[in-house]
Image (cartoon, rainbow, N blue to C red):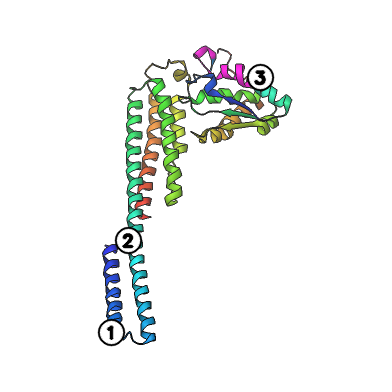
Amino acid sequence: MDKVIKVLDFSEYPGPRYISQGLDSGELFYEEVLKDSFNEAVEKKIDIVVDLDYTAGYSPSFIDEVFGNLVYDFDWIEIENRLKIKSDQEPDWNQVILEKVFPQWRKKKNEGHPRKPNDL
Amino acid sequence: MFKNYLFGFGGLILGILLAVFFSLNFSKTSDQLYGIGTIFNGIVLIVIATSLSRSQNNSKAIKDYFIQQLVQLRKDYLSFHDLLLDGCLKKSAITSGYKSNSMVIQQINLFLKKEMEIELNIQTLNRDCHFISCNHEEFDTKGNDDLIAIDLKRKVELEDKIKQINYLFTSTIISITKN
């Protein structure tokens, strides 16, 4: 059975990119929710669904930080096979994450850049 | 116009059928059969004329509905971006505004595709505007109730995207009119 994570359970008002920038950030969601759940999904060999619906809306940097970080912590094949994004209200987020966020973070990782600027 | 021609033509055929009908001698079986055929043809003609005219009215109503929806969406979209460019919107209003814009665009697109096989291809440009307005450190460090000022570089980028979106709105409305 798939593991389902709803961003709405984390916050109705998802915040900025980094913890240092404000409440309910993408970094906090990744560190406190998604990272462990994804680890669990890999161990149990199940899929993980991230449900983006019914929040008050996202700043693109929240989305970028949440999904981009996966690239640094997990094998690409695991991400590709296990991650499912549910966004019925704004279906194009799926495309943005697959075609924009992941390629940029994979490039950043492959070029040896740190996942986060040192001053943040 | 087409409706008037249709009714005129239908009336003419019906008149001919009635003239034929009354000239028949109903004591003959062949004339009785011919009479039944004439009546049947007349009924079919009336049904076709009525349903064609009704479907034409329905299709015009659907076109008018979509045009009205697109005109309203364009108006709302442009006024949202006017406020954004003038720095009059709070961070929370920008985030939720982009969400509601996306949802409305998606809904209209869904029905446009289904009913008229036309697409309103503005969602990618809308998301580009979202990224230009919100995907930067200055936006992230502001509080939800803070007003967001857009710098000159982003203003130029946004105005260019909005121009493209406005063009697509107009060309979609023209496609509906021609459909």
In the image, taking residue B111 as reference, residue A50 lies left or right, namely: right
Tell me the chain of label 3. A
Prevailing SS of the magenta stretch: helix
Q: Which residue is mark 1?
A: B23
Q: Is residue B70 magenta?
A: no
Q: Is residue A30 magenta?
A: yes
**Foreground disc of the pair 3, 1:** 1
Magenta residues (range): A19-36
Q: Which residue is mark 3?
A: A36
Q: Quadrant of the C terminus of chain B?
A: bottom left
Distance from the alpha carbon under mark 3 to that under mark 2: 63 Å
Specify the farthest residue to the front: B27
Could you confirm whether marks 3 and 2 are on the same chain?
no
x then y, percent, for residue B12: 27, 74
x then y, percent, for residue A87: 53, 32
Tell me the chain of label 2. B
Residue visible at 33% across and 67% down? B46
Tell me the chain of label 1. B
Q: Which residue is mark 2?
A: B53
